[in-house]
Amino acid sequence: MEHQRRHASIHERLLYSTRVQRLIGMVIAVLLPAAWLWGWGFWQHITVTQWNSLLGTATAYLLAVTAVQRLAKLPGTRAYLLIVPSITLCYCLLLIVLYLLTIEHAQQHILVSYGSAVVYCTTGYAISTRFSRLKLAVVPFGKTVDLCHGQDVDWCYLDAPALSQECVDGVVADLRAELPESWERFLSDCTLHRIPVYHVTNAFEFLTGRVLLNHLCESCHGTLQPDEGYEIIKRGLDLLVVLLLMPFVLPMMAVTALAIRLDSPGPALFTQQRMGFHCRPFTVYKFRSMYIDHEGTGFTQNGHDPRITLVGRVIRKYRIDELPQLLNVLKGDMSLIGPRPESLELTDWYQQDVPFFHYRHVVRPGISGWAQVEQGYAAEVDGMVRKLEYDFYYIKHFSLWLDLLIVIRTIKILFTGRGSR
């Protein structure tokens, strides 16, 4: 069985080792450009300027690769799409820091290092993705039959407690089901031979980015407690980012407010009571995108909603109507990233039909969130159940890396207008 775990041979383990990949990348992206520009014996007469460039490029490269590798572990992430943006951002930050601190550096080495890092990482991920499609064996008992399908995975449904000739990345089983003794021995043998065994609901979370509500009791509420240490850091980052954005967004907000007043009668701002952190109501600020004399349902209708103004359609599509919520972030009512706050009316409705609904208020609501970038707008009960599953995944995996992924996908949505109503 030791040969039935994929990539288990020594050369494959070395090839897929993140440490080995980083080491090879350091040679290709940092040392080889230095040797090409300064000569193969450059370390014998290296200058302070060259040292600064070597240390800077090594730091930028490691930060970029670490970010890609951490983000690649999150659901629905294609690592090869993050490579160029991550490397570009880290090398740009390096140049900004060097110029601001007036540190002498070899600019040509940094540029060659950047190009080498992009080529190496892009080529490496392009090759690895051809052989890295996840392959999981399924133990056919309990909930695995309902949950183990799709998700861009090669599922291998087992007929007997053996892998036969299959080489798999892991085995998925319902560890709370009544398994025959032969299947329990099989799972023990898999663990003994370092073939990972995943509980079915954990595998579902990893693949979909959702925590199923009807399986929530299995996880216990304690496991959904957010990291309080990161919560403090996140609050500081919120304030810093908003203060940095204000000089750029204030002129845009002024133009938007003027366009709204010229387009239809009524105030430029719309205020509403929403349910917030620890179930405390607060007043949310948005740009008005609807006529003030049109009545409708308590939520935005899918398709053509006659209440939305001409300017409203534009600012809703590109989320410009959300900009006043930066004031809510400064006040502490909201965060930049978190579950979207619902109106008090919808909150009362959902609480009656959706179990555990109020638990989403254990973290601050956000301008954007995991459910928004994965699902989009949802108001009906069925849509809210799925949205809540995404919210619970966010709370359970509350971290800087998940927030960073949400920021990246939010920026993509801002340029495409996907998912607006």
Image (tube, helix red, strand yellow):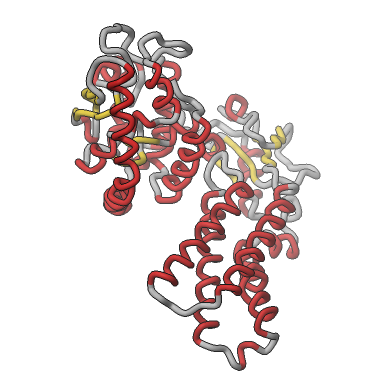
Q: Residue furthest right?
A: 165
Report if residue 54 is visible in the image.
Answer: no
Location of residue 21 with respect to 125 vertically, above or below: below
Q: Residue furthest bottom?
A: 44
Looking at the image, which is closer to me, 347 or 366? Answer: 366
On the rendered structure, is 230 left or right of 92?
A: left
**Residue 10 percent location from the top left of the image:** 73, 64
Location of residue 68 with respect to 288 vertically, above or below: below
Report if residue 321 is visible in the image.
Answer: yes
| Residue found at x 64% / y 42% | 171
Looking at the image, which is closer to me, 127 or 291? Answer: 291
Q: Give residue 148's quadrant in the image.
A: top right
| Residue found at x 22% / y 30% | 279
On the rendered structure, is 95 left or right of 272?
A: right
Q: Give residue 40's quadrant in the image.
A: bottom right
**Residue 127 percent location from the top left of the image:** 74, 53
| Residue found at x 59% / y 24% | 146
Q: Where, quadrant-wise, is the C terminus in this rendering?
A: top left
**Residue 157 percent location from the top left of the image:** 71, 32
**Residue 329 percent location from the top left of the image:** 26, 41
Looking at the image, which is closer to me, 339 or 271? Answer: 271
Looking at the image, which is closer to me, 134 or 170? Answer: 134
